[in-house]
Image (tube, coloured by chain):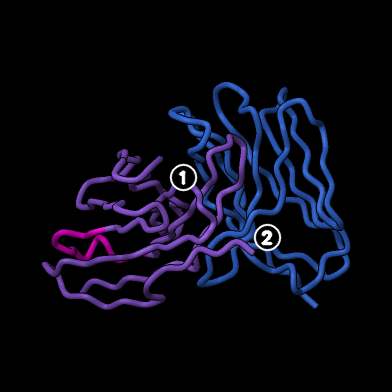
Chain colours: A purple, B blue
Amino acid sequence: DVKVTQSSRYLVKRTGEKVFLECVQDMDHENMFWYRQDPGLGLRLIYFSYDVKMKEKGDIPEGYSVSREKKERFSLILESASTNQTSMYLCASVPMAIQETQYFGPGTRLLVL
Amino acid sequence: SQKIEQNSEALNIQEGKTATLTCNYTNYSPAYLQWYRQDPGRGPVFLLLIRENEKEKRKERLKVTFDTTLKQSLFHITASQPADSATYLCARPSSGSARQLTFGSGTQLTVLP
């Protein structure tokens, strides 16, 4: 069965802290994505990766960076957390074939104080 | 850029009735549209994909239509049940890559007993 896991379900951080969100998939998928989800705005793509060590900016990359050192793991980094980064963060993975569905993790609800 | 809109933020319906959710897109017709279900505090889960050349697709009590003239997809749940209460998202391929999706902001469906 398909499995995407995220390191934390809930996280509380202070403004200025460096925050790491980790996502692991066990399906050998090449493509991985990080989204944030806010009420009324839907899912917005932050960064994605098509392969190990490869990354591409999504629609809202400012204030974020990513790391993909291994195929199964895709990390989202908030270099200096700010209150406007309080959100639900969702990771997804997709196999290489086009038109495949996105498999999502359970999400991390981040609160920045 | 490719936009996708779900007109209703919330929809309440009586148990046993058919729920109909709307998804409208702009610009050119996408090769396909996808529908996802999202429960509170969880990641979205894929339900159905309908291709541009398919008028209708069914899966158990779910039915999706794709009207390229109206630039619209309709998502129907027949004989709705309280367990169908969730937020439903539609998504289309983004202009940058077929592996990326642009999501609507979702319609929150509540099925009343």
Residue linked to disc 1: A30
Tell me if residue B77 is in the magenta stretch.
Answer: no
Tell me the amino acid under the disc marked 2. Leu
The image position of residue B105, as x and y in percent, is 52, 51
B84 lies above or below B58: below
**Horizontal side of residue B15 vs B109, given as left or right:** right
A31 lies above or below A74: above
- Give SS at disc 2: strand
Circle 1 or circle 2, nearest the eye: 1
Tell me where the magenta segment starts and ends, as one range. A77-87
Q: Residue furthest left?
A: A16
Instruction: Name the subunit of mark 1.
Output: A
Choose between B33 and B108: the one closer to the eye. B33
The image position of residue A41, as x and y in percent, is 43, 51
**Horizontal side of residue B97 vs A49, given as left or right:** right
Quadrant for the N terminus of chain B, please: top left
At 35% from the left and 56% from the top, the residue drawn is A74
Q: Do labels 1 and 2 share a chain?
A: no
Tell me the amino acid under the disc marked 1. Glu
Disc 2 residue crowd, few under 14, some 14–19, many 20+, Cα 10 Å:
some
What numbered label is drawn on residue B50?
Answer: none
- Give SS at disc 1: loop
Residue linked to disc 2: B11
